[in-house]
Amino acid sequence: MGVSLIALTAGMPRQSGGSQTPTPSPSPTPTPTLSLSPTSGSIPANAAPGYQLFTITGVPSGVTPTITPNDGRFVVGGSASTGWVGMLGNAAISAGSASLEVAASGANSATFALTINSASSASLTAPNNWDYIGFGDSRVENGLGAGLGSSGYKATQSMLSWASLVPQESNNRLRLGRYPNFGISASNTFNGSMIPRRPATYTSASPSAAATQSSPPTWYRGSDSTNKGIDYAAAHPAGIVMIMHGGADNDLDTGARTRFQSYITYLRANAPQKLIVILNEPPFGVNQAGAVVGGSSKSVMDFAAWQKTFDYASGHANATPNVIVVDTNALIADPASGPTTYLNKQGFYRDDRHFTAWGSQQVARAVHQRFSSAFGSAYTGLPSRVSLPVSNGATIAADTIGVHSGFVHTNPLLTPGSNGSVIAAGFAAPPPASSIPQGWTLSGSNAVLGADITVSVDKTGTDPDGYPMTTITLAGTMRSAKFTGSISGTTLTIESMDTSQGAGSIAIGATLYAGSNSYFIQALLSGTANTAGATYQVSSGTAKPSGTQMVTTTGYSVSLYQNTIAGSGSELSLTDKLRPVGRVVPLAGSKLFAGAELTGYVRTGATPDAKSQQSALYNIPQGGNTGDLLGYLLSAYGYDAGGATAPLVGQMIDLADPNMDTANGGPGFITTPGSVIQVSVSVTNSSGFDQPALAVVQLSRVGLARVTS
């Protein structure tokens, strides 16, 4: 036919001169290797059964790992869902060494080198109670806030510190004590020295001398150094003191060790019944984006290793009764770094040293695992200390004060019932009242900033325990803008808009940032919005010259709440103690999610005054969002904050708190209290460009619970 057609059938070899070129076989899939962390360790011969030696990762799905020698001294514990661990079994161990091999079908085995020291004389006993306080620096204080002012007393928890996430990771076996913030931020003078940590009676000759406490001794601890000395920690009623406390990298020397050891000495001398938990010093230097912006010297690693010697089971001469160490250094340190500069693994810090929500969760989980290994069933057998509502009931009438039900409001179960309420002014398009659970109200923060956000509520769901579940969704576009301009007096003039990544828009009501100064955008004065030449009215502030780089940060939030403010307040007794509790679970896949919040209030009227009290949990984490803010990790980094699936519980509101008494310098007791329980969901955009926003949060069994402590 004059045309040569060559047709090669897919998968058939090409023929050439009667010979055949074989098709290459696919490369075999490499066999994975198990990973143990750490890979070596030492314990005393009297370490208790259940003591955790290492974690096991890389186990193929559906496979249970095994350990050799298989003589009862060492066993594998945990599960695929909670994580596999190697730990001591019930058979007796003796001084010497052992090589442990962990195997799993479908994976290469891994080994652990164990040194068993002579029996330690240091002992471990369960604390008097399982409440704890956080003692340390900004890595503690970032999560534990308190304040007293014109709006009353506020006790807050942010999930940007491990100290706030320990209750959730322990399934609420462990609980924050009252006024738990013994963190002092941003001052090595305070952090690394004994001032003001040491008691007023401290002398080098008598380092354990007791100090005189103020009256009352449990007064709240805010963002300064007041009442945060080691003497206050020793006198605190909490049974556990958790310490994450290092110092400047160049200060982890003999002096730093002397100061740190003095804390342990003082606590042992003045509160020997307390459990001391040391979270040893991790390295720093890598931010959440993976950029190296610092680093730690070997002194940090040496200091962390020295801190480990205080563990009661270390077998070291420093081993101290009732002291356990959580090896946060091993958890966070990048094993590929060193030997001169040591770095952290990416994901733990939002800057170079302060925790992300994911990092906080990992550290809190390590605390839980250390308690599990140290105390065994004495800890793991503890019940959850959160009582979620199991039924609805009317609030207490005036004639039955003193006959207290478990919860203050009428519908803590979020039973769908009849229509709830919607305050339409805060929404561009308010959701229907029929979507709101009976007795609850939904409000929005700003209809202008939320103009491109659609809010929907679904009250027809069911949570994993079979109780009613309400889902709140925020979806749409969150405005922001990046541009150059000038500010004179209260007039902002736009010179050029940066549209390289989108047509950012300047929203009325947004916050404008120019350098270190911020302004509130109040109105469009002239010209076309979001174009060169337009002028806006802004709040008064520092003048800015032509060509100043500026960005607007916008945010929108909704709140679902139930209150009794409008009533007589008779559902509360003036001696009531209350805690906000509930399940608040942000879902993975959110964008520009700024966090969820669970808050309980006691106040008179709609506006808090000096006698009001508030307990709040901020920045409740969620998994894998794609719009990072306040330490939530971008899903592109491969990290997942996991969601706060355990029941949440806030700090206690005590209507008869002696610290509110005017006799103790307080503002006075509230006399006609009303109450509010509230969940808020927020999205925020600081990119400089309009961006898609999405937040999905599931709520169930949310209430303000009466408690005894």
Image: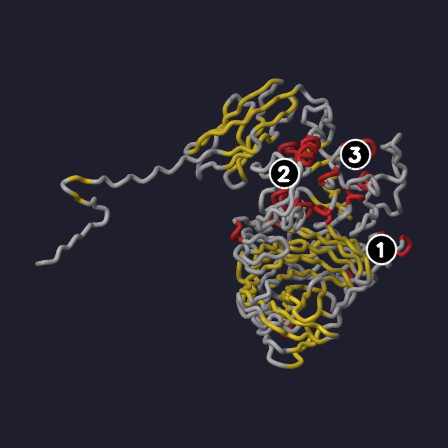
Which three-letter amino acid code belongs to the residue tagged 2? Thr
Distance Cα–Cα, label 3 vs label 1:
40 Å
Query: Given this view, does label 2 or label 3 mark the residue nearer the observer?
Result: 2
Q: How many marks?
A: 3
Q: Is residue 261 above or below residue 213?
A: above
First-in-chain label (2 vs 3) = 3
Query: Callout 1: helix, strand or loop?
Result: helix
First-in-chain label (1 vs 2) = 2
Image spot of residue 195 (x, y percent): 84, 41
Report if the CB atoms under discs 2 and 3 are less than 8 Å apart. no
Side (left or right) of 109 relative to 433: left
Report if the CB atoms under discs 1 and 2 are less than 8 Å apart. no
Query: Callout 2: helix, strand or loop?
Result: loop
Out of 230 and 527, give the one closest to the viewer: 527
Residue with the mark numbered 1: 660
Q: Residues within 10 Å of mark 3 (few under 14, many from 20)?
A: few
Residue with the mark numbered 3: 255
Which three-letter amino acid code belongs to the residue tagged 3? Gly
Displayed quadrant of residue 402: bottom right
Query: Given this view, does label 3 or label 1 mark the residue nearer the observer?
Result: 3
Which three-letter amino acid code belongs to the residue tagged 1? Met
Out of 615 and 356, give the one closest to the viewer: 356
- Outermost residue, right side: 663
Mark sitting on residue 341: 2
- Outermost residue, left side: 1
Q: Is residue 7 above or below residue 52?
A: below
Displayed quadrant of residue 346: top right
Q: Residues within 10 Å of mark 1 (few under 14, many from 20)?
A: many
Out of 122 and 173, give the one closest to the viewer: 122
Q: Is residue 33 above or below residue 545?
A: above
